């Protein structure tokens, strides 16, 4: 049997089986945009706020224990994921997340009513607005939920990045003795080791993870308690302090009050900064993926210093072809992360007066980026990085013909003579070492000492 609910705009029938209410139903009708619903991280974070708020309001003697405890129990069910299918508002919705806040309020209210043996929609007894949303507004709860959701998902990402960096360091140690040509401007440069090259990738990933961790910690400062415009209207003076203590338990860390409640609603700079750290990570990962693709290019017409694991056939037309598909996929993931950040940046500057209403699109893009990275990075590590092999013969062959080896003779014969030697070696198709001995510039013993690629590749800082 359908049930009828009433709001300030009128009445509407809802299927009795659903826990959401009339305002959620209006949002579903108004915003049939993408078919995408809010992420579980945001749903569960929002429920954690409602639980903490009910506990705080009971502690402050504003909410009776019977409805309060039912709200807590219903919120805990939402946090467990058992009611995820009841959150039906599109990610592109009314500004400020009001529609989604009401989706949460209504689901928790109706589940709490059910627990109290009351019919769904009996809002005179337990109201989505007066009880579940007590002392709150969409304006402070939605960004607070965004922070909590990103903190949770971001913690997983930091752990995944640590795993990727360690896999790269393992490969760096494995290849520490493999001398090869360095390259700058895509042209031959003095020797490096393959190990040093790959360890530098690990350092870049670690540095990006540090930035993400720093921006994640900034999100522990929460806007909750500011209510509609930052004044705390309709909240108890001690509500913010009390609810933050409860949220700290849920977040596993110390949640901090906003330094300025008005700024906390006007500005979404903290979320934008976190998104920017994802973009910075993506830029590094694109660079690393491109180096992997180039170093493994071939097998006969490219650089071919690396061999990548074979994970699938590379062509529907060319038998035996194998492509660097894992690195290609990482590129595409990172391009999307960078694009998501562009949307976040536009939304961050779109705030007006006491509120930025564009937060829903910001958190959707941030959580989408984190989700893609969290899903794919472990696969990339397992199916690409962990199986990388070095073609040491190829590395040495290319290094022996590298004219930049003449750089090692500059202290002995000077820049101009070294440049002439490099030019002539290229013209004759021989190594700098061979030509230097043939011309009598170096003895065999001197050439072996001065043009030792392994020694040069180790450098000063290994």
Image: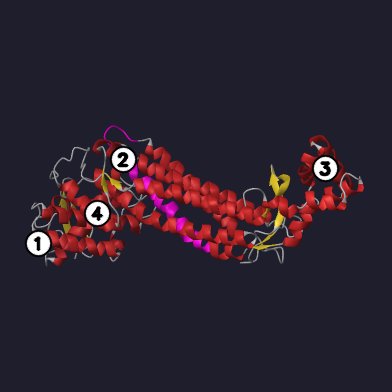
**Residue that badge 2 annotates:** 357
Q: Earlier in the sequence, mark 1 or mark 2?
A: 1
**Residue that badge 4 annotates:** 247
Q: Nearer the viewer, mark 4 or mark 3?
A: 3
Left or right: residue 272 versus residue 322 is: left
Q: Quadrant of residue 277 in the image?
A: top left
- The answer to whether the residue labelled 1 contacts the one labelled 2, judged by CB atoms less than 8 Å apart, is no
Q: Earlier in the sequence, mark 3 or mark 2?
A: 2
Between 130 and 120, the residue placed more toward the observer is 130
Left or right: residue 57 versus residue 24 is: left
Query: What secondary structure is found at the residue carrying circle 3?
Result: helix
Between the residue at mark 3 and the residue at mark 1, the CA separation in whole angstroms equals 86 Å
Region in magenta: 351-379
**Residue that badge 1 annotates:** 66
**Disc 2 packing (10 Å; few <14; some 14–19; many ≥20):** many
Q: Quadrant of the N terminus?
A: bottom left
Q: Quadrant of residue 395 in the image?
A: bottom right
**Residue that badge 3 annotates:** 422
Query: What secondary structure is found at the residue carrying circle 4?
Result: helix
């Amino acid at each position: 049997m359908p049930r009828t609910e009433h709001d300030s705009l009128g009445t509407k029938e809802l299927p009795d089986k659903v826990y959401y209410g009339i305002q959620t139903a209006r949002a579903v009708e108004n915003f049939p945009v993408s078919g995408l619903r809010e992420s579980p991280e945001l749903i569960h974070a929002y429920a954690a706020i409602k639980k903490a708020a009910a506990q705080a309001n009971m502690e402050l003697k504003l909410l009776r224990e019977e409805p309060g405890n039912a709200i807590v129990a219903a919120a805990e069910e939402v946090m467990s994921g058992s009611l995820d299918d009841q959150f039906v508002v599109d990610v592109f919705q009314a500004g400020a997340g009001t529609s989604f806040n009401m989706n949460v309020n209504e689901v928790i209210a109706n589940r709490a009513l059910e627990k109290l043996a009351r019919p769904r929609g009996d809002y005179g007894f337990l109201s989505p607005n007066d009880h579940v949303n007590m002392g709150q507004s969409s304006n402070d709860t939605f960004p607070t939920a965004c922070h909590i959701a990103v903190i949770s998902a971001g913690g997983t990402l930091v752990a995944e990045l640590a795993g990727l960096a360690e896999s790269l360091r393992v490969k760096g140690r494995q290849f520490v003795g493999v001398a090869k040509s360095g390259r700058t401007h895509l042209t031959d440069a003095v020797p490096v080791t393959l190990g040093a090259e790959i360890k530098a990738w690990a350092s870049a990933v670690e540095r990006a993870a540090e930035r993400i961790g720093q921006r994640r910690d900034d999100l522990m400062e929460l806007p909750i308690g500011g209510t509609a415009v930052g004044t705390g209207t309709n909240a108890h003076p001690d509500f913010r302090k009390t609810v933050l203590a409860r949220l700290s338990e849920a977040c596993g860390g110390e949640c901090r009050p906003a330094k300025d409640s008005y700024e906390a609603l006007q500005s979404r700079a903290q979320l934008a900064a976190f998104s920017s750290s994802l973009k910075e990570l993506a830029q590094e990962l694109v660079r690393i993926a491109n180096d992997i693709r180039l170093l493994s290019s071939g097998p006969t017409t490219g650089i071919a210093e690396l061999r990548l694991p074979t994970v699938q056939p590379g062509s529907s037309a060319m038998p035996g072809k194998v492509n660097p598909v894992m690195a290609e996929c990482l590129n595409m993931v990172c391009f999307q992360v960078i694009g998501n950040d562009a949307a976040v940046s536009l939304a961050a500057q779109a705030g007006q007066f006491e509120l930025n209403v564009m937060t829903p699109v910001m958190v959707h893009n941030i959580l989408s980026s984190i989700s893609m990275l969290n899903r794919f990075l472990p696969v990339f590590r397992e199916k690409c990085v962990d199986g990388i092999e070095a073609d040491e013969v190829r590395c040495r062959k290319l290094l022996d013909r590298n004219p930049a080896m003449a750089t090692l003779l500059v202290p002995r014969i000077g820049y101009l003579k070294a440049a002439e030697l490099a030019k002539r070696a290229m013209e004759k198709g021989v190594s700098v070492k061979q030509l230097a001995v043939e011309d009598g510039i170096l003895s065999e013993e001197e050439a072996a000492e001065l043009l030792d690629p392994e020694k040069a590749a180790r450098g000063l800082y290994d």
